[in-house]
Amino acid sequence: SQTIHQWPATLVQPVGSPLSLECTVEGTSNPNLYWYRQAAGRGLQLLFYSVGIGQISSEVPQNLSASRPQDRQFILSSKKLLLSDSGFYLCAWSVQGARNEQFFGPGTRLTVL
Amino acid sequence: AQSVTQPDIHITVSEGASLELRCNYSYGATPYLFWYVQSPGQGLQLLLKYFSGDTLVQGIKGFEAEFKRSQSSFNLRKPSVHWSDAAEYFCAVGAVGYSTLTFGKGTMLLVSP
């Protein structure tokens, strides 16, 4: 069966510090991968998605970036965090061509102080 | 492009009462439709999905949803709500040729004793 992991589970970082959140999927090959952010009261915002290694699509211009160095690994990064980057970050995956049914990881709670 | 509207931000239901959460979508062709549930601090869990065929779909935890093309709706229902159903519910729409889902802003369900 497939599983999706995210770490860390929680993170408290000062403004201006770098960020690296990691997401890995097990039990499947060549998945679509997604990064979402939930800010308080603002629903689910798609940040990036990837349909293959090195292929990243950005949905929202910001100071975040994403990379996919391996087939089942998706990394969300920032060089300098802003207060507005605080939120709950979710990674998800889907089978390519399978009608976009997405499966979500447990999330990372990021607080920028 | 698709869009999703969940008109109710919060809904309070008494335990044991029936529940209906509304979802309206905008898309020219037949969409792929999903309902997800999120408990506080956790990722999203898929409740049910509609791709084609029978317009009444059954999901996990006793939930069902009905696709009504004429009303562009995919409302979620449960005949008897349990206190453990208190959570946030998201409706999402996908489409052929798209690698992403469009999510509604969510409806927070509160269950009163």
Image (cartoon, coloured by chain):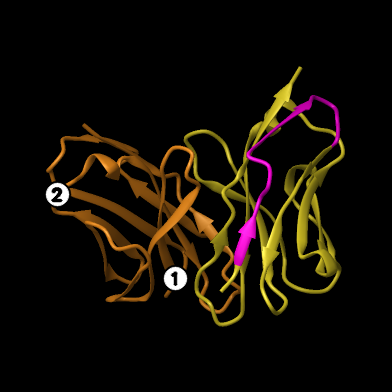
Q: Secondary structure at mark 1?
A: strand
Q: Please, is residue A104 above or below residue A49 in the view?
A: above
Task: Give the farthest residue toward the top.
Answer: B113
Magenta stretch, residue numbers: B3-18
Q: Secondary structure at mark 2?
A: loop
Tell me the CA gap for discs 1 and 2. Answer: 27 Å
Q: Residues within 10 Å of mark 2 (few under 14, many from 20)?
A: some
Residue occupying the point 48% across, 51% down? A44
Q: Please, is residue B12 above or below residue A74 in the view?
A: above
* Residue corresponding to mark 2: A80
Q: Please, is residue A63 above or below residue B41 in the view?
A: below
Q: Is residue B17 magenta?
A: yes
Asked whether the viewer can see residue A1, the reply is no
Amino acid type of the residue that numbered disc 2 sits on in the rendered structure:
Lys
Asked whether the viewer can see residue B35, the reply is yes
Q: Nearer the viewer, residue B27 or B64?
A: B27
* Residue corresponding to mark 1: A32
Amino acid type of the residue that numbered disc 1 sits on in the rendered structure:
Asn
- Colour assignment, chain B: yellow
Q: Earlier in the sequence, mark 1 or mark 2?
A: 1
Could you tell me residue B8's position as x and y percent?
68, 42
Callouts 1 and 2 on one subunit: yes
Residue occupying the point 44% across, 71% down? A31
Left or right: where B18 falls relative to B42: right
Could you tell me residue B21's position as x and y percent?
75, 45
Residue occupying the point 42% across, 61% down? A26
